[in-house]
Image (spheres, rainbow, N blue to C red):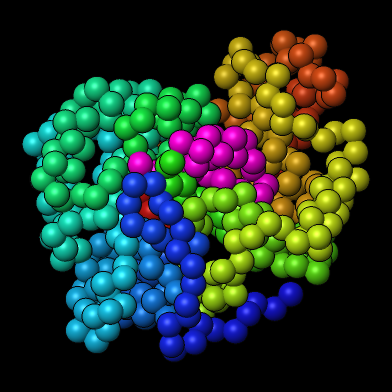
C-alpha cells in the first residue's frame, strides 16, 4: 500500500492529547535521532512537522548533534513562524547516574544547546535497572529532578525505560513521574498493561519507535503486507496504539516525507473500525497458521531459566520471523543481544543448556530447547551498527 502524500505547507489542525501534568501533545511526536545529516536536514524536518500538526519534539544529549541542530532550527522557526514555535512542547532526557552537581551541569548544557530557558518535559533516559530507579527515587537523581522542577527549568519529569515489567511497574506506582516512554508495539504487547495502568494513574505515555523498533514496519516484507491488507502494516500498528489511548507515538523522521503518516492519522484516535479489527484478526490467524504447533504464546511461565536465557523474548522474534516473514527485523534485534548494554537482552539462545527445567512449565508443551536452537540458527548473523550510542 502506498504511503499518503507529503505533508502540506500549511499547518494541519489536529487534536491535542493530555500528557501527564504537562502541556497537551499531538498524537505523533517528532523524534530527533534521525535527522542528523546536517542542520538543514533537521530544520526541514522541523518545519514539516509543524506543518503536519505535530507539536511535540523529543530529543536527548545522547543523540549526537541533535540538540545543537534542533536549537538552531528552533531559533529560525521563531524568526519565521513565532506562533508555530510557541505551540511546540519540548522533551529532552538525561542518562541516570550523575551526582547532583554533574546532573545540574548536564541539564544547563542541554538548555544552552537547545537555546531555551525551560523544558516542558525532562525524562530519565533509560531507567532500565534497579539501581537506576533507586538513583531517581532516593538517590542523587531525586534531588536533581526536584531541583530542576523547583527552579522552573522543567515542567514535569518522567522516564523512558527498556527494562522489565516489574521495574517499570515500580516506577509508575511510585507517583514521582508525570509521564513515561515505553516500547509499546502491535508485535510486542507485553507492556500494554503497564501503559494502561500509567494512563489510569494520570501519566502521559509515549510509545517508543512503533515503526522501526516495532518491526521495521516502514519497510515490511511481502507476507506482512498481505497479512495486514487492505491496511499498510505501519498504519495498522499506529491505529492499534492510538485506539489503546496511548498519548503519543514517536516518529523518527530523517526527511520531511517521513512525516506523511502523521498527516493521515493525526486525528485518527478513536476506537478501531470493524475493518481494522478484521485485519488484526486476519494478521493473527496468518501467524498462527504458519507457526502451527510451534507458536510461543508469550505466557512467560517458562521463566526463570537457570542460564538466564530470556526465552519469551527470543521466541517472540522467532514467531515474527516464521509467522510473518519479519526475519530482517528479528535478525537485527537478535544480533544486538549482549552488544547494547542494559538497553537490551544480554544472553542469546546459544546459552540454553537443554536442562529441561522449562518444559513442564509450558502450557503448550513446546519443545523449547529445540525452538531456541532453531532461533539461533535462523537469526544469528553479523550485527548492524546501532543508530546511536
Q: Residue at x 37, y 34 (%)?
A: 127
Please name the residue shown 13% across and 59% down the image: 117
| Residue 244: image location, x then y, percent | 62, 49
| Residue 208 is at least partly visible in this image | no
Magenta run includes residue 200: yes
Residue at the spot 49% in from the left edge and 67% down from the top edge: 15
Q: Residue at x 63, y 80 (%)?
A: 4
Residue 200 placement, left or right of 67: right
Please name whichever residue, 67 or 345, is drawn nearer the observer in this view of the structure: 67
Q: Is residue 133 above or below residue 340?
A: above
Residue 342 sits above or below residue 50 on the image: above
Q: Quadrant of the N terminus?
A: bottom right
Q: Is residue 239 left or right of residue 287?
A: left
Please say whether residue 43 is visible from this viewpoint: yes
Residue 197 on image: x %, y %: 53, 35
Which of the 4 quarters of the picture holds residue 263?
Answer: bottom right
Query: For residue 233, which quarter of the picture?
Result: bottom right
- Write the start and end of the magenta stretch as one range: 178-201
Depth check, front residue: 71 or 197: 197
Q: For this view, does 303 lie left or right of residue 132?
A: right
Amino acid at each position: 500500500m502506498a504511503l499518503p502524500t507529503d505533508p502540506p505547507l500549511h499547518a494541519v489542525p489536529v487534536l491535542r492529547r493530555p500528557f501527564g501534568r504537562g502541556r497537551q501533545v499531538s498524537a505523533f511526536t517528532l523524534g530527533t535521532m534521525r535527522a542528523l545529516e546536517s542542520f538543514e536536514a533537521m530544520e526541514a524536518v522541523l518545519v514539516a512537522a509543524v506543518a503536519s500538526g505535530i507539536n511535540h519534539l523529543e530529543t536527548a544529549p545522547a543523540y549526537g548533534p541533535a540538540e545543537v541542530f534542533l536549537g538552531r532550527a528552533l531559533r529560525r522557526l521563531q524568526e519565521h513562524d513565532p506562533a508555530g514555535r510557541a505551540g511546540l512542547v519540548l522533551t529532552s532526557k538525561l542518562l541516570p547516574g550523575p551526582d547532583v552537581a554533574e546532573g545540574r551541569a548536564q541539564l544547563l548544557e542541554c538548555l544552552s544547546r537547545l537555546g531555551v530557558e525551560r523544558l516542558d518535559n525532562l525524562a530519565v533516559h533509560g531507567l532500565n535497572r534497579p539501581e537506576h530507579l533507586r538513583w531517581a527515587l532516593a538517590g542523587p537523581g531525586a534531588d536533581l529532578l526536584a531541583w530542576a522542577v523547583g527552579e522552573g527549568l522543567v515542567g514535569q519529569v518522567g522516564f523512558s525505560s527498556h527494562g522489565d515489567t516489574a521495574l517499570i511497574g515500580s516506577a509508575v506506582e511510585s507517583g514521582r513521574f508525570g509521564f513515561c516512554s515505553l516500547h509499546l508495539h502491535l508485535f510486542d504487547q507485553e507492556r500494554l498493561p503497564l501503559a494502561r495502568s500509567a494512563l489510569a494513574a494520570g501519566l502521559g505515555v509515549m510509545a517508543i519507535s512503533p515503526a522501526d523498533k516495532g518491526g521495521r514496519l516502514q519497510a515490511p516484507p511481502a507476507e506482512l503486507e498481505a497479512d495486514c491488507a487492505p491496511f499498510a502494516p505501519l498504519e495498522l500498528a499506529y491505529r492499534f496504539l492510538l485506539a489503546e489511548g496511548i498519548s503519543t507515538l514517536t516518529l523518527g523522521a530523517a526527511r520531511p516525507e517521513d512525516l506523511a503518516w502523521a498527516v493521515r492519522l493525526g486525528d485518527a484516535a478513536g476506537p478501531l473500525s470493524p475493518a481494522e479489527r478484521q485485519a488484526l484478526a486476519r494478521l493473527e490467524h496468518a501467524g498462527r497458521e504458519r507457526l502451527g504447533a510451534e507458536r510461543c504464546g508469550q505466557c512467560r511461565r517458562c521463566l526463570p531459566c537457570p542460564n538466564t536465557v530470556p526465552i519469551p523474548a527470543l521466541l517472540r522474534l522467532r514467531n515474527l520471523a516464521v509467522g510473518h516473514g519479519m526475519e530482517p527485523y528479528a535478525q537485527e534485534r537478535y544480533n544486538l543481544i549482549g552488544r547494547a548494554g542494559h538497553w537490551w537482552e544480554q544472553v542469546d539462545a546459544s546459552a540454553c543448556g537443554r536442562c529441561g527445567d522449562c518444559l513442564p512449565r509450558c502450557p503448550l508443551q513446546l519443545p523449547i530447547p529445540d525452538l531456541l536452537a532453531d532461533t539461533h540458527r535462523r537469526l544469528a548473523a553479523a550485527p548492524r551498527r546501532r543508530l546511536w550510542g
